[in-house]
Each structure stands twice: as C-alpha cells, then as structure tokens.
Image (cartoon, coloured by chain):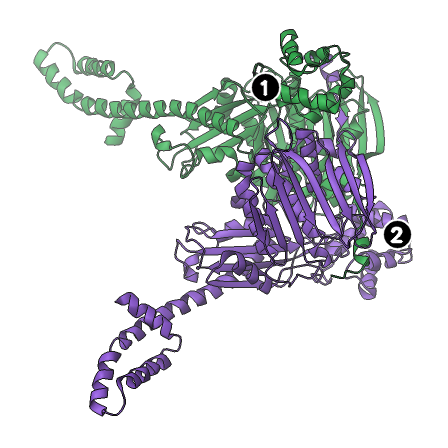
Chain colours: A green, B purple
Amino acid sequence: MIVSSSIASNEKFRSLSAAEFFYRNKEIAGFSNPARAIYQTVRELVENALDATDSHGILPVIKVAIESDVMPERPDVYLISVEDNGIGIPPDNIPQAFAQLLYSSKYVLRQTRGMFGLGAKMAVLYGQLTTGKPVEVVSSTINSSRIYFFKLAIDVKENKPIVLHRASFKKESDWHGTIVKLFIEGDWNRAKPKVYEYLKRTAIIAPYASIIFKDPSNNVIYFERSTTLMPRPPREVKPHPQGVDIELFKMLVQSTTAKTLKEFLIKEFQGIGEVTSNSIIEMVRIDPARDPKSLSNEEIELIVKTLREYNNFKPPRADHLSYLGEEIIKAGLKNILKPEFVAAKTRKPSVYEGHAFIVEAGIAYGGDIPPSEEPILLRFANKIPLLYDESSDVTWKIVEPKSGTINWDVYEVKWPAPLVILVHICSTKIPYKGVGKESIADVPEVEKEIESCVRDVARELKSYIIRKRREVEEVEKAVEIVKYIPDIATSLAVITNEASYDVISSGLMNLVLKKFKNVKIRDVKDVVLSVE
Amino acid sequence: MIVSSSIASNEKFRSLSAAEFFYRNKEIAGFSNPARAIYQTVRELVENALDATDSHGILPVIKVAIESDVMPERPDVYLISVEDNGIGIPPDNIPQAFAQLLYSSKYVLRQTRGMFGLGAKMAVLYGQLTTGKPVEVVSSTINSSRIYFFKLAIDVKENKPIVLHRASFKKESDWHGTIVKLFIEGDWNRAKPKVYEYLKRTAIIAPYASIIFKDPSNNVIYFERSTTLMPRPPREVKPHPQGVDIELFKMLVQSTTAKTLKEFLIKEFQGIGEVTSNSIIEMVRIDPARDPKSLSNEEIELIVKTLREYNNFKPPRADHLSYLGEEIIKAGLKNILKPEFVAAKTRKPSVYEGHAFIVEAGIAYGGDIPPSEEPILLRFANKIPLLYDESSDVTWKIVEPKSGTINWDVYEVKWPAPLVILVHICSTKIPYKGVGKESIADVPEVEKEIESCVRDVARELKSYIIRKRREVEEVEKAVEIVKYIPDIATSLAVITNEASYDVISSGLMNLVLKKFKNVKIRDVKDVVLSVE
C-alpha cells in the first residue's frame, strides 16, 4: 500500500503540564458541569477545612457561604467562600497550595480527607476558566503574629502559581485558620439539594464540628456541634514492607540518610527491627553493611521480591488511623436523623495491599426517618461523605435489598422500612474508583469487612425490632386485662365493703404493671384511648 | 484552645510529578490489580496500534502475544508484545512517547482512540514497578531507511524518560510500524476472558483489521479482516467558538501568529469568517486591528462571553469525525456473531459543549446468538470496546430491559431473546467517566442520540420479527394445503385421465407457492417432515 509521506509528519507530539491535563479533563475530577462544579468546590474546600482542624486536634468551626449576583451581567457566577479555624498555611506555601496542581501536604502515609492534591486547585482552575477571576486566600498559622492575604491564578501551561497580589497585616486577635474565596460559574438551583445533603452528612460524620452555611438566598443553616468528643488525630506511618514495589524502594533509597542496608531496612519501613532485618539480609545474601545507594537493580529486585514474600511481618499498623468510634457515630445519627433506634460498630483493623483500614457502620431506625423501599445509605471514606455513583459503590452491592449480599428478612426488616445505614471506611489509602472521590472499588478484603460490619449493626437492630414487637404484644395483653379492672374493682368494692373502688383499681393496675414489666401506665392509657 | 506549636510545622508540602501522581494512583487509570493490568496493557497497546494505522489510511495488521515463563522465579511475570504496520514514530519522539506521562501526539482536536496520553506509559510504569524491566520499542517510519531500537525506563520523580539503550539498523525491507515489548506482573487466568472478549469486540468494530493473538499457552487466534472498506481517517479541527473558555482563549492568543483581533478570530476558530467576525467585533466594541496579544483580561472575558452567547454560529463540524458507517457495522456483527438478522444505523452529527459527535448503532438477532434475559451490549467509543462498568454507562440506562428507557415489548422482543446491541459514539472528546476509559457519562445530548439510534435499529428488528412470524404462519398455512395435494392429485389424475399424477401434483404445488410468495419448497418440505 502506498501512503503519502505527509502522513507521518502530520503527527505533532507535545507534552502537557499536570494543570493542562486536568484542565482538559476536568470532568474526571468531578467538575463536569456547572451544578456539579458548585458541589465539588464546596466539598473540596470544606474537606480541606476539616483536615486543617480535626486532624490537628482542633474542634472545627467552618463557615461556608455561597453568594449570587457577584459579577455584572453574569447571573451564572457565584462567589464561594469557606473559612476554618485550622492550623493555617505558612505564607511561602500558599501560592503553590492553591495554584499548582499536584502540590500538597497530603503526600504522606497519613489518613486525610484529601489524597490527590487536586481538589482545591481544580476549584481554582474551574473558577479561573469560567470567570477569569483569581482565588483569594487569607491565612494565619497558630503562632504567627501576622495574617497573610493573596490573590492567585494558575499558569495552566506551566502548572505554576501566578501571585497577583500579596499582603500581610499585624494580627490583633488570636485568630488562626484559612479563608478561601473564589468565583465560579455554577448552577445553584441544580446544585442545591446535593450541597445541603453534603453538609448534612458532614454534620453526621463530624458531630464535633460546628458548620454554618449561608446560601445565595441568604438562608442560614447552622449545624451546631452535638459533642466535643473528637476522633484521635491520624498520624503518619512508614510504608509496610509487604506493600513495597521496586519504584517505592528506589525512592526510599534516594531519600534515605541510612548508611547501611541494615539501617535502611529498620529505619524506612514499619515492622522491621533487628531480628527481622537479619532474617531478610540472610535470605538475600547481601552484605548488611552495604551503602543502600550502591545497590544494583538486580539486588533491589531481589530484596523487594523477598520483602513481598516474607510472611513473618506484623500486620500494618492501624493505631495511626483516625476512626470515629461508636459514640460519635451514634451521636451524629441521633442528632441529625432523630431516629427511635441507633446502633454503631467499629471493627478491628484489617489489611489490603499493605494498607491498614478500619470499617465502621451505624444503623438508625424509625422515628423521623421516612419508610422507603431501600435503605438510605450514608457512605463515608476518611470522614468524607460520598454522594454520587452510589450504585457502583461496593457498599451498595452489599446492602441493596433485591440483589444485595444481605438478606434483610433475616434481620426482621420488612420493606418499606425507615432504615438508614452508615458505612465509614478509613485508611491511609482509600481505593476510590476515580479522582472525583465518589465511589469505592470492590477490593475483596474491604468488601468482606463492610459486610461483616453491617451485619454486626443489623443484628442489634434485629434484637430491637423483636423486643419492640414483644413490647407491643405485651401492651396489647395488658390492655386486654386492664379493660376488666373497672368491673372487677366495682365488684370487689361491693363484696369486700372495706376498700374503696379507687384503692382496689389502682392496686389491680399495679399488679398488672408488675406482671408486664415493660409496659408503662402511659402506654396502657394510650392504647385504651386508641381502642376506645 | 491551646494547641502546641509543633502541629503547624508538621505539615510537609511537596509537589509530585505527573508520573509520581499516576504511580500512586494507578488504579484510576485501570491498573488496579494484576488481572486488570494485563487487560489494560493489551488494550492500550492495541489502541495505539490501531491509531497508528486506520487513522492514517493503512489497513491494520496487528500482532499481539502474551508469553509466560519469561523471568526466573517469577511465574507471575508475562511478556506482552504488540506489533503494528502503522506510520511508525520518529526516533527523537520515541523516548518521551513511551516513558514520559502526558506526552502525546493525541493532544489535538481530532478523533483518536487515545486521548489522555497516559495508556502506554501507564503500562510501561506498571511493568517497571512490578518487574524492574525496561520497555523495548522498535519502530520505523514510512519513508525512513532505518529501523530504531530503544530500551526505556521512566524516571518517576522527574517524569522524564531514561534511555538505557538506543540503536539503529539499515532497513532492508519496506516494513514500517512499531513493536512494543514489556514485562509486567499479571494474572493471566483471571485476565483471559476479558482479553479474548476485548479482541473479539475489536474485530467486530474494526472488521478491516487483521488481528493475530498468541496467548501464554501458545493458542493462536486469527481474526482475519472481513472487509477492506475502511472508515475515513479523522481530521484535526479548530475549536468551535461556542465551547471556548477563558483559558483556551488565552492559550490561543499565546500561540497565534495572527497580528490583529479580526485575523485571530477567523484563523483560530472554526465557523468564523469575514461576516461573523465583523458582528462579533461590533458587539464587543474593540478595535479589530488590535494585536490579540495586547488584549486585557477584561477584554478577553468580554469576547469569550460574547462568543459563548452568540447564537448564529454553524454547528461544530462533523466531517472530520471518523464513524464506521452502516456497512462496516453490519459486516462486523455478521462476521463474528453469525446472527440471522442484522441492521445498523449511523445518525447525523449532533453537538454537546462545543464538540460534535456521531452515534451509530447495530442490532443482531438470532442465529448463533444465545438467548438471554438481557441484551448483550457491545459498547464502543471512538472504535474502542468498553468492557468494564457496564451498569454505570449511559447506554445501559437506555437498553436495560427492566428499568431502562426502552420498552422492548414495543419492538416485539420477548425475553429471553437472542439479541445483541452495538452502540458506537465518536467525537473529538468522549465524555468518559474516568481515565480508565470504561464508561460514558450521561450527558443529556449524548443520551438522547443513543436512545434515538437504538430505536432506529430496533424498529428494523421489529419489522423483521413481524415478517418472520408472518412467514412462519404462511408456511404453516401452505403446509396445511399441501397435505391435501397427494389426494387431490390422485383424484384428478383418475377423473381427467389426461395428465399423470406427477404433473398434476407439481402443478398444484406451483399454485400454492404462487399464492404464498414467501414460502419456498424447502420450507414446506421441512415443515411437512417436522409435522410427520
């Protein structure tokens, strides 16, 4: 086949900066349309705000505002601002932290809401390309005597921050934290239900946070903290040797200060001490005194293979994970949903691909919860509510009533049921299906833990439902008996001629209540009334 | 609240290269486990191979091989190689094209299978971190007199290629194309069904390609081309003004050679000529002779706003899109599925967010297709088969029998039915839900077109099913009548005493066949036989 020479030369190769890549593919980070953009912006900024507070032991106070009519002739533009009382950001880091993609303090092995170093920058980028406006950042760290103010834009071609304005002021109060303001093109009407739902779920998962939200119609909603109990802050860990790959090993070799292979193994990995390092070095037959930087590719491959296959490591540490705990989960569910029953369970740590993880679940039933043909599922990952793509999430596969793993009949749940299920997974690495952080992949180990955890709380619900049914039956029995009290008391009063009717009837009532321990006078009166 | 000062200083900010980002988050590009890694590697390399051939008018010949037992003591390592007869890659571009993420020839407005500039590099990266081995590339462009050979690795920290080996040889034949070989850790047993399904679907969508595949057990499967009819190669287009944003406008200003605003508008956008540029310039009231590079931010915002709101542009051009056409779709379905009925439809171009797109659908029914409770759905985007995440794809929402948009009763389809539906969408920008390219988002314009297109082919199926039912009924009627022919012919032969039995009976048979035009002698005999 004859092909003209012009064909090959037509191909123009070029490279993209990370900023241009995500600019072109913003939908994969959740910025797919103006409605989703508002939701995504709010959540990314709120999640940063929470990471800056509770992860450092500070009770969060988060202020969120969305304003309309902020740009002439652009009714589709909104100003979104989020303020926190967190640790603040050092001024030298602010430009990159907000205007350079893939720059973050989250690139360590530590459980944080943020993970990709993308969210806030994507919001800044989206605002910039739809409105042309810079982001405004005000921040002060805890011990700083000054407050810093920046206006920033992203140089998309170069993925570098452009500092349009920088100023600082003497700090007169003890305020610390960060305020971010940005203009974006949005669709508030379509975003509204998702934003409210997001904030409500955030209040459920972080009942120790106070969140104030003002919407474009000046409606203000205040989620006041319902507890001051806070989860323990997450801590950074070293990588577990079982999850290491050749690339990670090489990076650790590059950055280590260890002078010998043995020191390197002990210093850079969790769970390797004197004894374990000796066994490993014996298995690979490399001089323990070797400088790690002198290792050949073949030697590195051998060590990595040995680490991955060595079966005697302790499981990855989970004591650095920041789970909520059963009390906080129950407080959150009670406070927001007003159910008649709640239960919660935090499972023991488990492991996938070298990452420790913990699954927690809560269940809420009855009360103000409306009955529905499916459970209302509240999904959370590292304390982030996940709202989109529910049907492709691993948890939905488990709890869905028709074809899910769990048969709800077993737990005495009859649909439609007033049932809310909360599932929270925390880990240094959440197996998200995409950078938009909306659904979790069905990693077998994770799936198994979620199922067990939901069954744990479902069993408690079952006991409650059975107990409640029995109580209703008891009340009905008691009522049956109580109905005869007036007649019997009258007869007895006549026969004995000693006690008055009132004394006898209240004595009989006491006898009945003694027999039906769970029945209260109020119940009986209610039922008698409702029967009459 | 008193917080210790050590908290703030704990935060370590750093930046990641694109390579390190995708190394850490390889699952979002489809490399989530060893089984998926084999599938993803095969598809990325095959898609590059097809882009290098059919997009340039070359009938593709693609050779794919997966070998096992290629590394001592690593039974989990496979060598994957893919060879094409495409345009080849210039030697100076090879290192970056295979070992630098976000470097590509696909970053232009043109319909290609590749889009993100990630796929092949992710395979190289995954191979490198699981086996430590470099990728090997052999390539020669069409008019080159030499063949080039490279061994490459990725410097993950810097996102730069490392050239381990480079050589070239004099070309003795007229061979051109590219061969890529790489070692990866994989799980062939679990990957096998997906890889076979992927290749089968590729053969359906590209029946003009010859694909030879050798698996680790040395089984060879050969999908021979069934047509030399090829879709028209896609062409690059300029951006449509309706889809422009501030960032894109600024990039075009940066790179343009136009000296005036008016020239800039005409030169850099599609659908803007003399008249349109005049109207736009009049609306924004900026001097048409202004150097575009001198425009202020406010002026750019004004022009972009005007372009987006101007309603008189022609719709985006679709003549650059490379759809398959009804003949190729039917050839592919017939060749691979051996159905009794096929139909295909290519819709007229449509538009979303400034991108033209075309939807095509095919339907195949009966024959070798096994009946099933749901249609077998073959999804394609820019000629790529999509295998994973079916339930979250926009097309599944439409065709799913229970809750989908389409009520199949209307089309006379009764479940279980032997039904295959093929849907192909092509565009310069496919609205994928993730960089793994597995499912398409429910963009309203796209959803509407897919539904209409499936209904188009479903109507043809309905006519066929009704016609077939009528034919069966006719045959049954004809058989009823034919049964009496022997008796009648005998009687007539006796009565007339002129014609023999044979003449009369064949005359009667002809009368019957003339009445039932769709019935053939064979049908009648079959039915008579089956009745007897």
Judge left or right: residue B236 versus residue B484.
right
Secondary-structure class at tag 1: loop
Residue indicated by mark 2 = B292
Report the Cα–Cα distance between label 2 and label 1.
53 Å
Compared with B531, A526 (above or below) is above
Residue drawn at (38%, 34%) of the image: A417
Q: Nearer the viewer, residue B520 or A218?
A: B520
Chain identity of mark 1? A
Task: Give the quadrant of the C terminus of chain A.
Answer: top left
Q: Residue A524, located in which quarter of the rendered image?
A: top left
Residue drawn at (23%, 87%) of the image: B492
- Give neighbour class at mark 1: few <14, some 14-19, many 20+ (Cα, 10 Å): many
User: Residue A322 got which mark?
Assistant: 1
Q: Nearer the viewer, residue A227 or B419?
A: B419
Cβ–Cβ under 8 Å for marks 2 and 1? no
User: Residue A55 got which mark?
Assistant: none
Task: Give the quadrant of the N terminus of chain A.
Answer: bottom right
Across and down, in percent, residue B321 comes to 69, 59
Q: Nearer the viewer, residue B102 or B508?
A: B508
Q: Residue A171, located in which quarter of the rendered image?
A: top right
Residue A101 visible here: no
Across and down, in percent, residue A364 comes to 44, 27
Amino acid type, label 2:
Pro
Q: Residue furthest top?
A: A274
Judge left or right: residue A375 versus residue A95.
left
Q: Which-is-in-front pick, marks 2 and 1?
A: 1
Across and down, in percent, residue A102 comes to 74, 32
